[in-house]
Image (spheres, grey):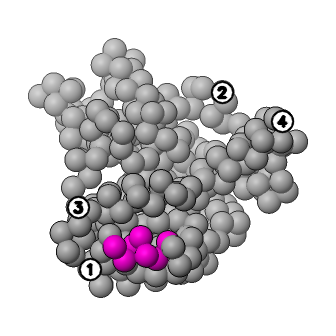
Amino acid sequence: MTVSVTIARHIPMLRRFARAVTGSQASGDAYALATIEVIASGEMPVAQNGDARRDLFTAFVRVWGSIPVNGVSVAEASAADMAAADKVLEEMSPFARVAFLLRGLEGFSVNDVATMLQRDPEEVNALLDQAGREIAAHMSTDILIIEDEPIIAMDLEALVSDLGHRVTLIARTRAEALEAVEIETPGLVLADINLADGSSGLDAVNEILQTYNVPVIFITAFPERLLTGERPEPAFLITKPFQGETVKAIVSQALFFDRKAAAARKASVTLQ
């Protein structure tokens, strides 16, 4: 079995992780491609008879960590342009966020994460505690859930409420979602792709984004359809069936990058 065949089935999830780390499809896909190129060159081999997924993600972390700016918080570079609340958020170690995503989003063990980050397991546990505590503490917001399955919607509501967020409404259709944002603008949207009346969560979100600037996380049982790297695709994606820690990790990361973008926009307006 060739290396390309060995890693092929893991590439969509690598794209998901890379997009979550960087906050965008374009940047995440670029890092994923760079990782694949490094592996193809033989610089970072993947064990064909071992844990190819772990080796693939390890290669990504090494590629990501090889760029000095990735290890520096934005606050260190542009603290003068940010409000106090934003500085608290940005000062969190990037490695704490990466550790948080490797553990919460991808489900790697603490020992695996320690190996990937070249740190001791005790240090990784400290990073995980730091990330979870700091992300949750500074990003409470109102959330609109677009989901037609009641049990899944209730699970999502419980998970985000546990992080300190408030669910404004649970919409089962595109029409309900559009009505909900007119009543109260959310700070985040969690959207299923296929809805009860045959309508599309994608369509609902596209209409919402024409009027409101709000971060969106899509939920789907078929992530490979939205992780091809061939067209505009979501930066943040949750796969059904999901784990609670996965939802918490992605929600926190989506809000993190939304706050970062808001700070950048504010700084840009100020400079003008």
Task: Name which residue type carries label 1.
Answer: Glu
Q: CA distance from mark 4 to mark 1?
A: 46 Å
Q: Is residue 164 above or below residue 39?
A: below
* Element type at mark 3: loop
Mark found first going from the N terminus, 3 or 1? 1
Foreground: disc 3 or disc 1: 1
Q: Residue at x 59, y 50 (%)?
A: 257
Instruction: Find the magenta span and give its range.
Output: 175-181
Mark found first going from the N terminus, 1 or 2? 2
Dot 3 and dot 1 residues touching (CB under 8 Å): no
Dot 1 and dot 2 residues touching (CB under 8 Å): no
Task: Name which residue type carries label 2.
Answer: Pro
* Element type at mark 1: loop
Look at mark 2 in the image and give the residue it sits on.
68
Look at mark 3 in the image and give the residue it sits on.
221
Task: Name which residue type carries label 3.
Answer: Ala
Marker disc for residue 271: 4
**Quarter of the rendering containing residue 79:** top right
Q: Is residue 15 above or below residue 213?
A: above
Residue 242: give x, y in percent of width and height: 32, 67
Q: CA distance from mark 4 to mark 2?
A: 26 Å
Position of the N terminus by quadrant: top left
Q: CA distance from mark 3 to mark 1?
A: 13 Å
Foreground: disc 4 or disc 2: 4
Residue in front for this viewpoint, 55 or 157: 157
178 part of magenta stretch: yes
Q: Residue at x 30, y 43 (%)?
A: 227
Residue 152: give x, y in percent of width and height: 31, 79
Look at mark 1 in the image and give the residue it sits on.
149
* Element type at mark 4: helix
Q: Is residue 65 above or below residue 241?
A: above
